[in-house]
Image (cartoon, rainbow, N blue to C red):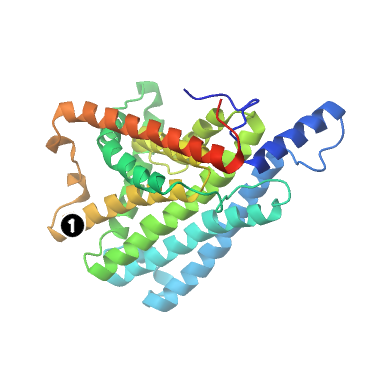
Amino acid sequence: MFPSVRGNPYLHPQIEKSLMIEQRTIRGGASDQEGNHPMKSLILLLLLAFSGAIILGAISVFIGLLATGVPVGDLEGALSEGAADVDFLKIVQAGSSIGMFVLPALLLGITEKRRHTYLDFKTQVNPSLWFMVVAIMFFSAPVFEQAIKLNEQMRLPEALSGLENWMKAKESEQERLTNLLLSDTTYPGLLTSLIVVAVIAAIGEEFLFRGCVQGILTRWFKNPHTAIWLTAIIFSAIHLQFYGFLPRMLLGALFGYLLFWGKNIWLPVLAHFINNATATISAFYLKRQGKSLDELDFSQQIPNYLYFTSFVLAAVLLYQYYKIATKQNTRSYGKTLD
């Protein structure tokens, strides 16, 4: 069902051009002047992300201190349940995300625009694909819920108990941060939560991982499926939430294929936004009812047979997305997916 990229005409013209450049360079034994090695692109991206996280993180802390009135010497106390402290945390989270994900992806695209296209905003998209992305995310939700439950049952051998305790500590730390970010039960608080957790996260992480990392790895391995799954693994691992590794990896792979077939970065951004926004809104209404996020579990409300039904429907929709997207590619570029 999924063809190999080697000799595959279903590539963005700029990517196909870059692969031809690299192949000619290897055959001729010349230095890589026109098409730089993917490792160089990856190192540059990491440097940009590291620098952006530090610079924008520091700036956002300064802005947060001014905007919320949190004492300079009480940054540790900012991680409490006070309303002003939550606002401070949201400002820092937003600034750090922009610095670590959004700006590095945009800067890499500008730096290497003569050689490679990472963020394709211009490829035409069949309007039905937008609706299909929404439907795919809706029907696949129970499947990912099952993946979460399966992942939570993970147990390491006794010899690795130290590693398991560290993983649990990181999980608790991330859970506490999430609780703080979503603790504001006012509607303005919901809006800012959606901006930080859904909008900025969806744009930034898709720009960086699907747009840049997946693009770089595709050039490196000459196989989009290897690139998609490696990117999904990196995407999941970097969140340091090990008991949610499996569902996040599967989500990352789904986003990767939405981009690979649809060719427009806004398609996986929409899917990512739907995923994060749904969780944010659900958590908001749980909080307003005085419930904890631990009660955000729909698995008990869904009959077992509906899991299989949702899987089938999601698979059918994804196949239709694949067919429509490749047909659009044929019409736009005169090429087919063989």
Mark 1, residue position: 285
- Residue 104 visible to the viewer: yes
- Report the side of 42 relative to 34 (left or right): left
Q: Is residue 7 left or right of residue 192?
A: right
Residue 165 appears in the figure: no
Image label count = 1
Q: Residue at x 55, y 46 (%)?
A: 211
* Image height of 114 relative to 58, above or below: above
Q: Quadrant where the C terminus lies?
A: top right
* Residue at 31% in and 53% down: 277
Where's residue 40, x and y in %?
Answer: 71, 42
Viewer-proximal residue, 313 or 163? 313
- What's under tag 1, amino acid-wise? Tyr
| Secondary-structure class at tag 1 | helix
Above or below — where is 173 with respect to 61?
A: above
Residue in the picture at 33% in, 30% down: 316
Give coordinates of residue 21: x percent, y percent: 77, 36
Q: What percent of the width, then of the height, locates residue 267?
A: 45, 47
Q: Quadrant of residue 248?
A: top left
**Image position of 289 (left or right of 71):** left
Residue displayed at 74% across by 34% down: 20
Q: Quadrant of residue 25?
A: top right
Tell me if mark 1 has few (under 14), some (14-19) or many (20+) residues whose alpha carbon lies within 10 angstroms of its own: some
Q: Horizontal and vertical percent for residue 67?
A: 40, 77
